[in-house]
Amino acid sequence: MTGAANGIRGVLFDLDGTLVDTYQLILETFKVVTRRRLGRVIPDEVLMCKVGQPLAIQFLDWFPPEEVESCVAEYRELNFALHDRYISCFPGGRELMDALHSRGLKVGVVTSKGVVAATRALRDFDLFEPLDTIVTSEDTTRFKPLPDPVLLGCQKLGLEPAECMYVGDAPFDIMSANAAGAVSVAALWGMFPADVLRAENPAYEAESLPAILGLLG
């Protein structure tokens, strides 16, 4: 879609692959946990194909339901230890949030991360303080690509979905935003190829975080 997104009063962001670059952190953690438990190597593209959904859902691809809880616990412990070595921040996030606030818009994060990991990543890069709300995997019982997380984010901002833009780098983000009736924006700088995102019919796409401001006219 071309032109400006009119009537937007709030902007919600995904976290992994959108505000922070966690590709290598997630990949390395998955590699170690799956290799330890399965005794074999799973291809990178298979390990990463469902990033954007909660860990428990991702682990069901490789482990029976009764093992998932312990897999998630092992993943989180290792991910915490590797965090500072592999995580970085995409340029322009804090500046964009400040610019959105200066225009009178509300700002939030809707992520499939748990609250502890999400808060750590946001605080590490000075992205927590500007937020008006945050929705994590612990706040809903249904997850992206279903609309519930985005709907909750809109509700917590006190806005209708049509008044909110949701920016994400995964197809699950676009699907969730569209299902919620929010204005979906494909983050082309993230983990998934542009054609994968475009297949989900985002309302807009952006090449960088600063480009989001241009979509608002």
Image (cartoon, rainbow, N blue to C red):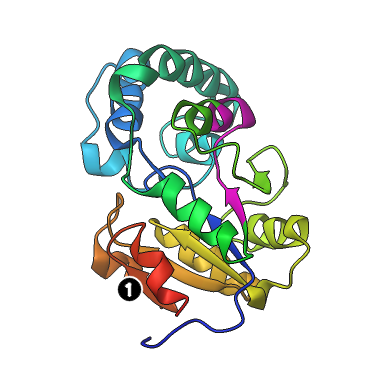
Q: In the visual, does 114 lie left or right of 21? A: right
Q: Position of residue 130 (x, y in %)?
A: 59, 44
Q: Where is residue 136 in the image (x, y as percent from the top left)?
A: 63, 41
SS for tag 1?
A: helix
Q: Which of 144 and 43 is in front in this view?
A: 144
Quadrant in which the N terminus appears = bottom left
In this rendering, the count of numbered labels is 1
Residues shaded magenta: 107-119
For image coordinates 25% across by 66% down, the residue present is: 194
Q: Position of residue 25 (x, y in %)?
A: 33, 27
Quadrant in which the C terminus appears = bottom left
Whether 216 is drawn above or below 156: the answer is: below
Q: Is residue 124 magenta?
A: no
- Three-letter amino acid code at the position of disc 1: Arg
Q: Where is residue 176 in the image (x, y as percent from the top left)?
A: 56, 64
Whether 4 is drawn above or below 178: the answer is: below
For image coordinates 52% across by 30% down, the residue present is: 64
Q: Can residue 145 be seen in this view?
A: no
For image coordinates 53% across by 64% down, the residue present is: 166
Q: Nearer the viewer, residue 167 or 141?
A: 167
Residue 202, quarter of picture: bottom left
- Which residue corresponds to mark 1? 198
Q: Nearer the viewer, residue 82 or 208?
A: 208
Q: Residues within 10 Å of mark 1 (few under 14, many from 20)?
A: some
